Amino acid sequence: MAPSAATDWSPLWISLETSITATLITLVAGLAAATWRERRTGAATALVDGICLLPLVLPPTVVGFFLLLLFGRHGPLGKLLLWLGATVVFSWPATVIAAAVVAFPLMYLTARAALEQVDSRLLEAARTLGATEWRVFREVALPLAWPGVLAGTILSFARALGEFGATLMLAGNIPGRTATIPIAIYFAVESDDMRSAVAWCAADIAISLALLSGLYYWTHAQGPARWARR
Amino acid sequence: MPLEVHIEKRLPEFTLDVSFSAADGPLGILGASGAGKTMLLRCIAGLEHPNRGRIVLGDRTLLDTERRVRVPARNRRVGLLFQHYALFPHRNVGDNIGFGLHDLTGGERERRVREVLERTHATGLERRFPREISGGEQQRVALARALAIEPEALLLDEPLSALDTHLRSQMEVQLQETFLEYRRPSLLVTHNIEEAYRLSDRLLVLSRGRVAALGPREEILRRPPSVEVARVTGCKNFSRARTISENVIEAADWSCQLRVAQTIARPVAHVGIRAHLIDFAESSSGGDTEENTFPCWLVRSSETPFRITLYLRLNKPPDESGRFELQAEVFKEKWQRFRGRPLPWHVRLSPESLFVMPE
């Protein structure tokens, strides 16, 4: 049961493009935040933790509302962008921003857990061998934390793919531009187009299931045994 | 190229406050667990930051809190060997050793890797991963990795303690060889006095963050300056003591008077004797008249493969309390000779073997 004859495939491409871009952003931002956080202790870091995790627990509508305030015409970032000649609200970048913000906590949490598990003596050994902090991160911490970071990446991607509430508030439903799969489903149901709704639901479930089972397969198949001569 | 260390670091339990200088060659650092040995190495390597102090290696100042100098670990050129090797599990042996040779060209790096592997008798392991080689090989590779960067000082944090007896003695031979050719300040942290003694001519004893003794190993073993140092260096027998005359003391816990070879300058607080230096009068008629000789009864004994430890009660037969005053260690051949003799036996605490410790 594919979407009806005059199928508009754009939600699929928009969803994939949005999720991939948002995932790349969360990967970099999540790793940076996790690395920063790992080196610090104290009360201020607890607040940072809280802020980083907030999008995970807040209703997506609340996140969307704050993003609207931030990026809207009168918001601080919105004004700045307007001055640069760009508007974000109700455009494709808005879907990316919404998806990235909502997916960020998952990336942050898993990346932090993975980095914390790396034996700190290995990082210290690298330092005594003359490595800069960047080399310590890139050649020791990241490769050792990689399974966790990859898991975080996949979870973030799946979350970005499923983002609905914040996207609708910040990016709206503009077919061919901001209408992702979840949004297409919502409006298909609203306009009684059950065939499309079911088809898009099936597509969404298929992609997510493939990702998640791929993730589990991968993490179980790849223990530390991979660091052996082949 | 000596290493000079004067540092103060506040720790939860005590303050690490040490001041010493180490010449080229190995220096054994002894101390009970939690005395601050590992922390001291970490401060020198630049992995921990002392609250105050100065560390100078040759002509380079690594740390000077007053002049706000703090060279980061990566620029200190101080090799650190970890107790559990700390090899990078995701890199093979060659890449582990090559990690510190980042600036060299590929060919030059390979040559250096081969060369240090030869020096540590671990040739041919280049392409193996750490998890594929034995603990002894891992520690050899870790040593090769530390030596590869041509460090100006070498810090070894209990390098043998994770190895089994056989590998341990092999690795010890390796370290002896390395110290012979390396000839730079090398600090060897251990809690095993025999290991420290075999590997280094000079010893430093740490006690709750302070230098309790520093000097040639024979001197520290023969005349430990305090009960703490005596205990860390393996001494088992102590008694409270007070001075009677220039070279006679009264040992309160052993209820006897003893002549000592040392001339007593300061008021004496304790007297000690090492378990293997306790002598037994061969003939049972030795009598109590002989100097520093006392009747003793066997309370219990415990065997090791070649030696036996005898727990002895001085001057009176043992009672139900199981109390003993002395631990003597004798080789089994000797033990065979007098084990059948009737009690009491006679122990001799020779004046040369006794050492006194001031307050």
Image (spheres, coloured by chain):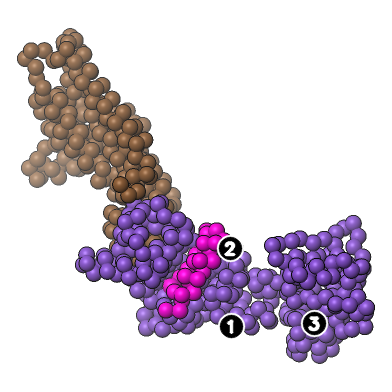
Chain colours: A brown, B purple
- Residue B170 is covered by the magenta coloring: yes
Residue B125 or residue B213, whichever sits in front = B125
Residue A69 visible to the viewer: no
Residue B85 percent location from the top left of the image: 44, 60
Q: Amino acid at mark 2?
A: Gly
Residue at 41% x, 75% y is B153
Residue B293 visible to the viewer: yes
Instruction: Kindly report the distance in space between the C-alpha atoms of the residues bearing marks 2 and 1.
Output: 24 Å
Q: Which residue is mark 3?
A: B350
Q: Amino acid at mark 3?
A: Ser
Q: Amino acid at mark 1?
A: Pro
- Residue B8 is covered by the magenta coloring: no
Residue B25 or residue A229, whichever sits in front = A229
Q: Which residue is mark 1?
A: B216
Is residue A224 found left or right of B26 in the rendered image? left
Tell me where residue A84 sits by quadrant: top left
Q: Earlier in the sequence, mark 3 or mark 2?
A: 2
- Local packing at callout 3 (Cα closer than 10 Å; few below 14, some 14-19, many 20+) is some
